[in-house]
Image (cartoon, rainbow, N blue to C red):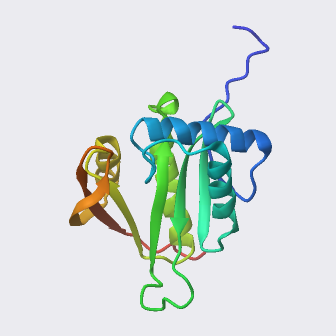
Amino acid sequence: MNSGSVIQQPVIELMQELSASDMDDLCQATEEAILDGNGFGWLTPPDRSLQEKFWRGVLLVPVRELYCARFEGRICGTGQMVKPFANNEAGAHIAQITTFFVAPYARGHGLAIGLLEVIEQSARRQGFTILEVDVRETQKAAISLIENCGYEKWAEKDDYAWNGEKFVRGYYYKKKLEAVEQS
């Protein structure tokens, strides 16, 4: 083995800012996910400037936490936890997951389950008791992941999303989170 080789482990991190190289990685991963059909709303990759504005905007919104997965040092996926606004007292116990994806080249390394676990841990620490996520019926791997991680389907919606050819159904999931014991 080459003694100069460094094996970088997959990492999940909460992002407070994005360097130029992180933004490049994030936009590339986003484009690949969109082309693979996991574009969290986009059907075709938007111009890079629009993607950069989107991701910078995410970092500015106080109720959003952006988690990024890194593989071999590069950002290759994301998940956001969206917390309720302060005026939503009735729903203050529920957080949501959105923009959840791992680029095709980085799949199979446990990053999606790692992202999900880190988001769940953050939600528990902040006192949320329910975490929700919605997904298109065509996203079989995501459905399998969230069902295997204990999420319960509570609703379906016809005409949830247009995939460029037809409407597809959406599935809504929730998971009841156990409280974090205070030590």
Image quarter where the C terminus lies is bottom right
| Count of marks placed on residues | 0
Q: Position of residue 116 (x, y in %)?
A: 47, 53
Task: Residue 52: give x, y in percent of width and height.
Answer: 68, 50
Position of residue 23 relative to residue 105, above or below, is below
- What residue is shown at x 45% (from left), y 47% (from top)? 39
Which sits in the foreground, 155 or 73? 155
Residue 10: % across, % down: 60, 37
- Foreground residue, 10 or 183? 10
Residue at 52% x, 42% y: name it.
Answer: 45
Q: Quadrant of residue 94?
A: bottom left
Residue 25 visible in rendering: yes
Across and down, in percent, residue 130 comes to 40, 73
> Residue at the spot x=54%, y=60% of the render?
80
Q: Where the N terminus falls, by quadrant?
A: top right
Q: Is residue 182 above or below residue 42?
A: below
Residue situated furthest top in the rendering: 1
Residue 70 visible in the shown view:
no
Q: Does 18 sit left or right of 144 as displayed? A: right
| 90 displayed left or right of 56 | left
Query: In the rendered view, does 80 fall on the left or right side of 48?
Result: left
Residue 28 to residue 86: above or below: above
Q: Is residue 156 left or right of residue 27?
A: left
